[in-house]
Amino acid sequence: MIPVGYMAKRVRTKPDWLHAPHVIDIYSVSKCQCEDFADYIPYWKHNGYWFFDSPEIIKYVAKENSIQLEGTSLFYYEAYEREFDGESWHPFSPEASFPTNVVPPSQKRLEGFDVVNFTAGTSPECSGLSCSSLASDLHTNAHCLFSSFEEAETNVNNGAFNESEPGPYRIFSVYSVDWP
């Protein structure tokens, strides 16, 4: 797993249409059901993985643009170094035109693993477990994430995501981090 960065998100409870009684809230990497703190891309402070290298950069963007961080949760992400195109795994790398220097947190709590599609190859698009309701049929934890990397990889390899959102798919480890 490679460090890809941080995001401040507004965690929501499970929507009524997601028929997964074991899910309490959504910690997805995508912004569809777990909203990013802002439409951050126009500020051009993200790294080559389209996340932030540190919590301080998120705080800077928020302060400079009068964006409230109150009520957000801070997440740190690592990604499996390969993405799945529906048939096989291939390496991917950060966008070279953006500096990428992720500062790993001193403390983090593993919440689970998400599978996200990247058709444009830039920012995360949809998390199939929540966006496409795959958590209704696949075993997830209370945050709508797989409990292990092996579960995520097995389901990707077995084609569980092929009929949800178009690929390629990347596997992320999702960590909660306390705001510094």
Image (cartoon, rainbow, N blue to C red):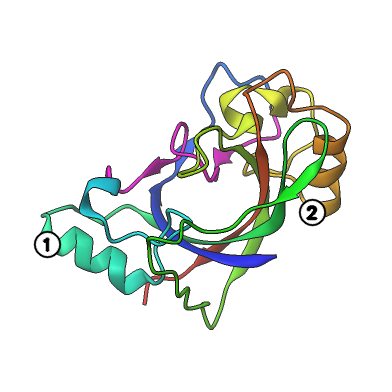
The question of residue 31 being in magenta is answered with yes
Q: Position of residue 45 (x, y in %)?
A: 28, 61
Chain part drawn in magenta: 21-39
Q: What is the total number of numbered labels drawn onto the structure image?
A: 2
Spot the residue most to the bottom: 106
Quarter containing the C terminus: bottom left
What amino acid is found at the position of numbered circle 2 in the picture? Phe
When the figure is inspected, residue 66 is found, relative to residue 31, above or below; the finding is below
Mostly what secondary structure, the magenta segment? loop
Camera-side residue of 163 and 97: 97
Camera-side residue of 3 and 85: 85
- Horizontally, is 116 left or right of 141 in the view? left
What amino acid is found at the position of numbered circle 1 in the picture? Glu
| Residue 64 numbered tag | 1
| Residue 149 numbered tag | 2
Residue at the spot 43% in from the left edge and 53% down from the top edge: 50
Residue at the spot 70% in from the left edge and 25% down from the top edge: 134
| Residue 81 numbered tag | none
Residue at the spot 47% in from the left edge and 44% down from the top edge: 122
Element type at marker 1? helix
